[in-house]
Amino acid sequence: MKRIALRAPKKAHGSVCQFCQFSSASRQLALQLQAPLFARKLSKIPKAAHKPKAYLANFSLCNSSIYRYASSTAVAQSKDDPDLMLRDVLRDSHAIITGTALPSEETVVELLERCKNIVKIALLDNEGSTEVADNNATSSLLDLEDENGNANKSPAKPKRTLNKNFRQRTTIAISSMLDELVRDPKVFISPNILHGYTVIQSQLKKADHFPEVFSLYASKPAPQASGSTITYHPVNPKSPKNAIPQELADMALDIAIEQQNLPLALAIVDKTFCTPAFRRAKVLRKASLPLMGLVGAPPAAYIAATYASTFQNTMNPTTSTWIAFSAILAYITFTSSVGLVAIATANDQMRRVVWLPGMPLRERWLREEERAAMDKIAVAWGFKDPWMQGEEEGEEWESLREILGMRGMILDKTDLMEGME
């Protein structure tokens, strides 16, 4: 009796081309189809045949290659299935929260990137389902045209079936998961994690927990692993590094305004622009260079005055030096004072909220972002017609006017309204 020799598929080393991958997949499919035939032939071999273990070894190699092909296919499908992607993200987040090890920042950031991809798919699916619903009448008319004998046209591509509930499930699951993740004491909220959290929640239109998360970013104890134990160290909430970036604060405020939630919008302003950390960060970011120039102005003026005194011979060089030094220093002081007043008293950007008379200039400069945020809220809650502004009524509007008065601001100052100049 002839012996059937089988060869195990060789593993490809390095990178292979598409044709080689296609041929290897074809061989694996062929082995899968021929497996029952091999089993029947093995059953017909007499017991006294020489070395039957060779057939069994070849058959096991065939089965292992089949299983490897099936598992790789399942992994490829899981990467393209949004439901499986969502399930994997929730499982990994649960493992981080319930685990006893300290998660690294890279792990949490990678999890947020996966959440961004899932949210992007959910938003695209929602837009696609809306377009499909709007084009039902047009597609039915096109189907009638196809029935009239247009057989020469190429067949239409099959439409993708959209899951209408996927966006709702994604919004609820990912939003709750992110809130639970940032509340976990083991997860340190770094600037990258805060940025990813704010972007995802803004895309999902979930702004209810922004004030809480912004407060945790500034005051949450920092975890540190020492062996198998985790210790927590307090942080300074007034430190400039714990300030909320302005772009993230504006993003969160826009979502609260879009939802017409006035208490949430005011809470976001309090946790971002009104904190000492934000004001200290603004001083370091925008006032450090002018302050350094102001401190270095007297030595530079003295050096320039000493050099200028060498170009005259009508008076004592020491007297000439001090006269020139006083003139240069007076010019610098006057010019910088006028520039500071011009910057602090500029009101071209103000629309409905202005400062109360007598507010110190340094307060105006430090709290300009707070005033701009309150101005944005007032514009969103008031009338859009400039000639109707000032006629608003209601409990929320009166409470907003009172809150602005306690913050040293005026809502709809009469001198700055349309037609009242």
Image: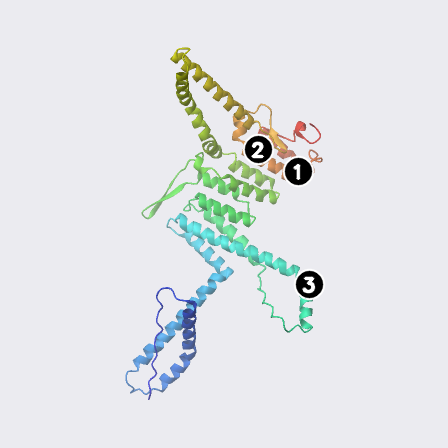
Task: Please indicate whether residue 303 sits to the left or right of residue 161 in the image.
Answer: left
Mark 3 crowd level (few <14, some 14–19, many ≥20, 10 Å Cα): few
Can you give x and y, in whole percent of width and height, for residue 320 in the image? Answer: 42, 13
Mark 2: which amino acid? Arg
Mark 1 crowd level (few <14, some 14–19, many ≥20, 10 Å Cα): some
Can you give x and y, in whole percent of width and height, for residue 80 in the image? Answer: 49, 62
Q: Which of the two marks, 3 or 2, is nearer to us in this view?
A: 3
* Secondary-structure class at tag 3: helix
* Secondary-structure class at tag 2: helix
Residue placed most toward the observer, 353 or 238: 353
Q: Picture quarter containing residue 146?
A: bottom right
Q: How far apart are labels 2 and 1 at the CA level? A: 16 Å
What residue sits right under mark 1 in the picture?
Answer: 382
Mark 3: which amino acid? Ala
Mark 1: which amino acid? Gly
What residue sits right under mark 3 in the picture?
Answer: 137
Q: Are marks 3 and 2 in contact (CB under 8 Å)?
A: no
N-terminal of the pair, mark 2 or mark 1, is 2
Task: Please indicate whether residue 206 sits to the left or right of residue 150 in the image.
Answer: left
Q: How far apart are labels 3 and 2 at the CA level? A: 50 Å
Task: Please indicate whether residue 359 sits to the left or right of residue 182 in the image.
Answer: right
Q: Quadrant of the N terminus?
A: bottom left
- Asked if 38 appears above or below 228 in the picture, the reply is below
Residue placed most toward the observer, 315 or 76: 315
Q: Picture quarter containing residue 41?
A: bottom left
* Secondary-structure class at tag 1: loop
